[in-house]
Amino acid sequence: MEHLSLLADGQDHDPAQERARWEKAAADVLRKSGRMTADDPDGLVWQKLTRTTLDGVEVAPLATPASLEGLPPVGLPGQAPYTRGAAISHPQEGWDIRAHLADPDAKQAAADAVLDLENGATSLWLTVGRGGVATADLGTVLENVYVDLAPVAIDCPDDPIGAAEAFCALLWERGVTPAPGTSLGVDLWSARSLRGFEGPQELARLVELAREHGCRLTIDASAVHDASGHDAHELGFSLAAGIAFLRIATEDLGLDATEAAQLLEFRYAVTDEQFLSIAKLRAARRMWARVLELSGAADAPGQVQHAVTGRAMLTKYDPWVNMLRGTVAAFAAGVGGASSVTVLPFDSALGLPDALGRRNARNTSSLLIHEAHVARVTDPAGGSFAVERLTDDLAQAAWWQLQRIEADGGVDESLLREEGGFRDRIKNEALDPRRKQVATRRRPVTGVSEFPNLEERLPERRPLPEQAPRVDRYGVAFEQLRDHPADAPVFLATLGPIAQHTARATFAGNLLAAGGVDTVAAGATGSVEELVKAYRASEPQSPVVCLAGTDAAYAEWGAEAVAELREAGASYVVLAGKPGARTLPERELDDYCAVGIDATKFLHRVRGELAR
């Protein structure tokens, strides 16, 4: 706050002096928290507070004018390289609010489509074929939809040509031209290698239909997100797929690069990491403009973007938190300059969304546009030292991913390679590190790995189709444990009065609950005798006991408590905290739980003991 006041008082200040004063203020806080010693220089705060994303991008704790040194110019909105936006301004109605439909029940999907369009949605995104609406039911689903007014994005990975032809037949029957922004299908690379479909993939026919009806085709980079890729993977794939499309369109189909580029729309996932999502959309436009420049299409317009709130961040447990995640992600999409935004309903991880989920999803964009006026300003994050730095760093990381794909022989070869290809890199560079962060709770998932509620009753929803796209959600390891609650609780052996044991008892209780394990607490105790008495009186008497108290209590009577609890029937004793000379020797214990441990492995060990 001191640094902010210096910037706001209207006086001139020496940047070096301001930096030194901020470093001292931040260092004082870190010394109080034990993260720095008295002998550490103040400048160490930059290293201590800088975090690194899964893409290897370092995010500094504070951005300054020096952060922009060496960055290329970003231009103006509506001008190349389109970093600040593909258009000078948003349309008067804001961004396109695109509702998603994937209900196999054609009549229900038709009703949902009309309800969405009559209550704020301005376009539809239809998952067609396996895992969604049957191709034969397109006429029923769109029976009351004015397809010449509301754009429709067809997404049929298993039979894109069949779905596109069925939709075009519908246009012919009605004698209408599809609304601008209509998309007839997704790219064959995300459909075939990332979604796992092996249907016919004749790109030439899709291009023919798109040109005939003035429609687009979609590069679906969100499939990389669903496959656990991170931002740079998603961006690198989108560019590689776009380049592959340009090559086919120009070399095999006879189009020029500008005409081919105008056929494309790009779909990206946005998440509750709002600044990364904002930077991702800005970086995507900049890099695509560079690709087009190198392809001889420098005069092509800016990249058209469809942003969808990420499926992987959604949770099945405490699904109401998904509303917050979706709101932050939609805000990032709007600020980042997406042309169309889809907010997935908060109950999407539970099954097919109901009316409440769909209403909240479309209202999220409506409120951001009409109440919060997020669409009133183009690129409101532009000029921010932090966002501009993050945009450039993410672009550099994504360009490196693109170069790796091209070095593999292009997107086809990289995706088909079993070892060392793009999918292998997703696993090694994003999936495994993210799982480790979630497991150790360095990347908390609210309602799942943090603040779980074992008493919650989940809303009931119709199940998703069996062939719906598989998504490795961030919190799935904890959710799988919660799906099958432990049969017995863990006894919390709380040492001392409530004020002394509450912190660690709460920590241990929340951690165990995250794995579907309930607890029974001893309450306030003043001696080993009282503790053992409470244990013997607990019903059922658990074989697993977790000591929870202060370090001083552990050192004073923890060893005696462990011995007496074992004598009373405990077969597995856990310490809430770290064992050591100041607490309890590790040899006295069977396990321990503390900040930074692999929580999922710990929970599996405890549940294994409870099941004996």
Image: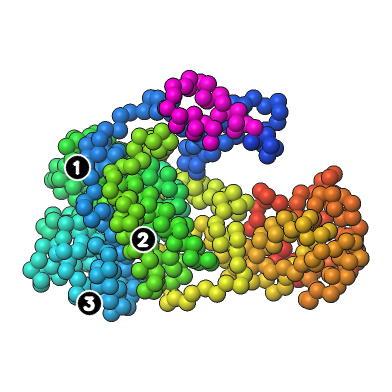
Q: CA distance from mark 3 to mark 1?
A: 36 Å
Q: Amino acid at mark 3?
A: Thr
Q: CA distance from mark 1 to mark 2?
A: 29 Å
Tag shown at residue 301? 1
In the displayed structure, 340 sits above or below 8; it is below
Q: Tag 1, which secondary structure?
A: loop
Give yes or no for residue 16 being in the magenta stretch: yes
Q: Which residue is mark 3?
A: 140
Q: Which secondary structure type mostly characterizes the magenta part of the structure?
A: helix
**Among the 4 quarters of the image, the one containing residue 567:** bottom right
Which one is earlier in the sequence, the residue at label 3 or at label 1?
Answer: 3
Judging depth in this view, the residue of 440 and 469 nearest the camera is 440
Q: Which x, y percent locates residue 231?
A: 42, 46
Give the magenta part as a residue range: 1-28
**Among the 4 quarters of the image, the one containing residue 148:** bottom left
**How many C-alpha atoms fall within 10 Å of the one at disc 3: few (<14), some, or many (≥20)?**
some
Q: Which residue is mark 2?
A: 364
Q: Tag 2, which secondary structure?
A: helix
Which residue is drawn at the image coordinates 69% and 74% (left, top)?
A: 487
